[in-house]
Image (cartoon, rainbow, N blue to C red):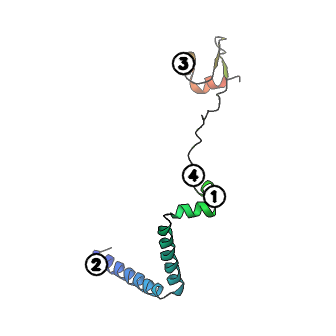
Amino acid sequence: MSKLAEFRQLERHLAEQLQALEAMKGDKALEAEIEFESKLRTLLGQYSKSLRDVVSILDPHAGAKGMKTAAPAGKVTRRARTMKVYNNPHTGESIETKGGNHKLLKAWKSEHGSDEVESWLKR
C-alpha cells in the first residue's frame, strides 16, 4: 500500500472515530456515568479511600475470587519421587533409584540406549 493510500485510509478512520465520539457526547447515559464517577471520586477523596477499599467493604471475598494471590507462607513441598527398579538382563545387576542421575544407570543408557534401558524398568 502506498503512503498516500495509507494516509487516506487513516484519515477516513479518524473521521469515523470523531463522528462516533461526537455522537457519544450527546448521550444522556454517558453524561450520567461521568457525573456518577466524578461524584464517587470526590466522595472517595473526602474519606481518603480507594476503589479497592470500597470493593473490599462491599464484597470481602472479591479478592479471593478475582485476583491471584501469592502462595501461602507455609512450606510448600514437592511430591515425593517414586522408587524405580531397573534389572539389567545382560549382567543380572539391579539398580534402585528415584531419579535419572544414577551413575550406573547413565552408563547403561549410554551403552545400550535409553529406550532399551527403560524397558528394563520393573517398578
First in residue order: circle 4 vs circle 2: 2
Residue under the point 40% across and 83% down: 18
User: Which residue is the extreme one toward the left?
Assistant: 3
Residue 39 relative to residue 94: left or right: left
Residue under the point 48% across and 69% down: 46
User: Label 4: how many residues lie within 10 Å, few (<14), some (14-19) or many (20+)?
Assistant: few
Residue behind mark 1: 60
Mark 2 → mark 3, Cα distance in angstroms: 68 Å
Report x, y in % for residue 97.
63, 20
Q: Secondary structure at mark 2?
A: helix
Report x, y in % for residue 6.
33, 76
Task: Give the numbered dot on residue 4.
Answer: 2
Against 109, residue 60 (above or below) is below
The quadrant holding residue 77 is top right
Mark 4 → mark 2, Cα distance in angstroms: 48 Å
Residue behind mark 4: 68
Q: Secondary structure at mark 4?
A: loop
Residue behind mark 3: 111
Residue under the point 57% across and 55% down: 67
